Amino acid sequence: MASAAPAETGRTVTTDIPARLDRLPWTRWHWTIVIGLGTVWILDGLEVTVVGNIAGRLSEPGSGLPITSGEVTGLAAALYVAGACSGALFWGRLTDKWGRKKLFMITLAVYLGATALTAISFDTWWFFLFRFLTGFGIGGEYAAINSAIDELIPAEYRGRVDLMINGSFWLGAVGGSLLSIVALDTAILPKDVGWRLTFALGAVLALVILLVRRHVPESPRWLLIHGRDDEAERIVSSIERQVEAERGEPLARPEGELTIHQRRSVTFLEIARTVFSKYRRRATLGFALFIGQAFLYNAITFGFGAILTTFFDVPTGSTGYYFAVIALGNFMGPLLLGKLFDTVGRRVMISGTYLLSGVLLFGTAWLFGRGVLTAATLTACWCAVLFFASAGASSAYLTVSEVFPMETRAMSIAFFYALGTAAGGISGPLLFADLTGTGRVGDTVLAFQIGAALMCVAGLVASVLAVRAERRSLEDIARPLTAAATATKDRTTGQTAGSRSATA
């Protein structure tokens, strides 16, 4: 839908649009949103997994790049994460200011171009540069996509949908693992061609997603706050017509209205004051969840292939099979446990998944240290750990996207993602590459124990501070900064108009 010129801000608007979005039943339209927005996590999973699995091949003579395996799993991985952190902050601010749709189109285009240029790398500096820029695009996606999804999905389904979408990263990981098997088979592709084609395929998939994403609307919630309530009304009315046509019956009457004072932007000072003063307990929760999951995933995932080759003599061309197995376990966690986050509740499920994954990882470290594991049994242990860890990690994104006010949502996601990932995601791969590179069992056990300890600490924090956000509207969980006193719907007239405006 074409964007209308924003109305003059400074007006007071009473609207039932958030309630109308939340009372919608699940329909094909919602699946369109999931496919159009959620599939980018598949690309992220493809990127991370391919790089980890082809590290050994890139370091071999004849690959076309003068690079070592440690540089791929260490420096290149850290640069990718550093790009994602800086991209999240840069694009996150613009997402709150310019809108969700404009930014999730731009950030995907950045990812597409950087991935395509990675495929033609001719020297290490080029490879490092475009790994950073690929991450820069992906980081912006995290902020823009999570904001848009949570603002478009009904409250009853928000938890499970958010977890499933964030967990779809691991579908990309399965694809990346299997793709790397083909790419590393020199009987099929030359050493200097196969790894390039994996990056090229990522660019092609991004182009397809970009075409699908054109049909995803702007968030009506964002439009309301930024003086574009007429456009918000048109979008929601169109969605309601599609849903009623599909179901063959009228929708239930929405309950509750919201009165807001429209404005175009929120300053950094207001964001900081809101997050660190008014919602400081929620800020502590966000830090704990992101640091725990970021270290576990960015440290261990990047180095899994190296562990297999170093300690179990698994050929580099076969590591993809093992990674495909743990990636599938990762996806099944959010898929099977996601509904419980909406029924059992956020606090129990977030703390439980973090604590269980941490305890199981401690057990894996103990078994690894005793030398009783094989490549297959280590993979089985990791499947058990990551089944729970994946649901927990996905809930970190869900948490920071729903517990802060609408005006700060994208920036809050970006901020916690960047700081948490910087703490665990940049230092993690560098530290883990050094620990596994020594070839000493004790060093790898230590890396496992650090990741397990951080997950357990995050789980304990969540048991105390997690917000009971299940089946609640976003505006009820965290009242918008622009909100005035809640208006009461006029039941005597039966009026269900989308919004009513009055100049303040």
Image (cartoon, grey):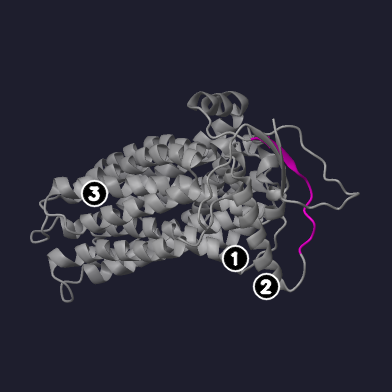
User: Can residue 70 be seen in this snapshot?
Assistant: no
Mark number, residue 400: none
* Residue where numbered disc 2 is placed: 246
- The Cα atoms of the two marked residues, 3 and 1, are separated by 35 Å
* SS state under label 2: helix
Q: Which residues are magenta?
A: 251-261
Comparing 143 with 210, the one in front is: 210
Mark 1 vs 2: CB contact within 8 A:
yes
Residue 354, image x and y in percent?
Answer: 54, 45
- The Cα atoms of the two marked residues, 1 and 2, are separated by 9 Å
Q: Earlier in the sequence, mark 1 or mark 2?
A: 1
> Would residue 352 be found to the left or right of residue 185 on screen?
right
Of marks 3 and 2, the one in the foreground: 2
Q: Earlier in the sequence, mark 3 or mark 1?
A: 1
Comparing 451 with 297, the one in front is: 297
* Residue where numbered disc 3 is placed: 130
> Which amino acid type is shown beneath numbered disc 3?
Phe
* Residue where numbered disc 1 is placed: 29
Bin the neighbour count of mark 2 within 10 Å (Cα to Cα): few under 14, some 14-19, many 20 and up: few
Type of secondary structure dominating the magenta stretch = loop
* SS state under label 3: helix
